[in-house]
Amino acid sequence: MAEEAAPPKKKSGKLKWIILILLLLLLGGGGGGGAYWWFVMRPAAQNAEGAPESANAEGKADAKGGEAPARNAKVAKLPTFLVNLADPTGRRYLKLTMEVEVGSDATVKELEGQSAKVRDAVILLLSSKSYADLAPIESKLQLKNEVAERLNQILGGPKVLRVYITEMVIQ
């Protein structure tokens, strides 16, 4: 009869803790997903719909790559550039595709008409860079500004509003 005196073990205490931990994990994951959507996906969706993320006083973009698109801006796609980088080993290359935001359709046609000069200027710029020059994000932003400056030199004025890097592969 001594065996009957021992009380049975309770499993409901462990089950409550497991349910509580799972509930906290679910709430934390939902909160994290909601925060990701709010801070990352929502601004991207607004930009895709044409709502500017930020604008200066005139609502226009600056020539150095500001974030507010101009109201009547047009986008011109540049050809894909494939160049050897200026690395000591000479084994690295860069594949880069860009689009440029310009003020008018006339500027898009002017860019197309100057395609040899555009390709030459961009290839010379890109091939002067090394992997170390292009790795940090600040360098990529600087590259966008340098491309805009070179294109504006070719076009004879501040006609390129912004440069977008649409594909970048460094091998």
Image (tube, rainbow, N blue to C red):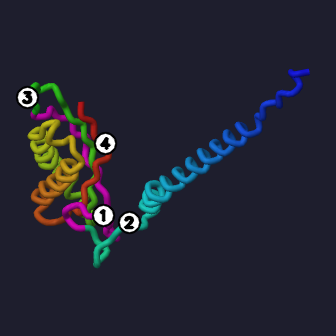
Q: Main secondary structure of the magenta part?
A: loop
First in residue order: circle 4 vs circle 3: 3
Q: Considering the numbered disc 3 on the image, is that residue within a helix, a strand or a loop? A: loop
Residue plotted at (26% across, 62% down): 102
Q: Quadrant of the C terminus?
A: top left
Residue 94 lies, in percent from the top left, at 21, 35
Q: Are marks 2 and 1 in contact (CB under 8 Å)?
A: yes
Characterize the local packing of mark 1: few (<14), some (14-19) or many (20 or more) Cα atoms within 10 angstroms: some
Instruction: Give the residue type that dot 3 points to.
Output: Pro
Residue plotted at (72% across, 42% down): 16
Instruction: Give the residue type that dot 4 points to.
Output: Glu
Instruction: Give the residue type that dot 2 points to.
Output: Glu
Query: Total of numbered circles in the picture?
Result: 4
Q: Quadrant of the N terminus?
A: top right
For disc 1, the marked residue is: 67
The picture quadrant where one finds residue 54 is: bottom left
Alpha carbon of mark 4 to alpha carbon of mark 3: how far?
Answer: 24 Å
Observer-nearest of 127 and 14: 14
First in residue order: circle 2 vs circle 3: 2
Q: Considering the numbered disc 2 on the image, is that residue within a helix, a strand or a loop? A: loop
Alpha carbon of mark 2 to alpha carbon of mark 3: how far?
Answer: 41 Å
Q: Is residue 29 magenta?
A: no
First in residue order: circle 2 vs circle 1: 2
Alpha carbon of mark 2 to alpha carbon of mark 1: how far?
Answer: 7 Å
Looking at the rendering, the stretch of residues picked out in magenta corresponds to: 62-86
Looking at the image, the residue that sits furthest to the bottom is 57
Residue 64 lies, in percent from the top left, at 19, 62
- Which disc number belongs to residue 167? 4
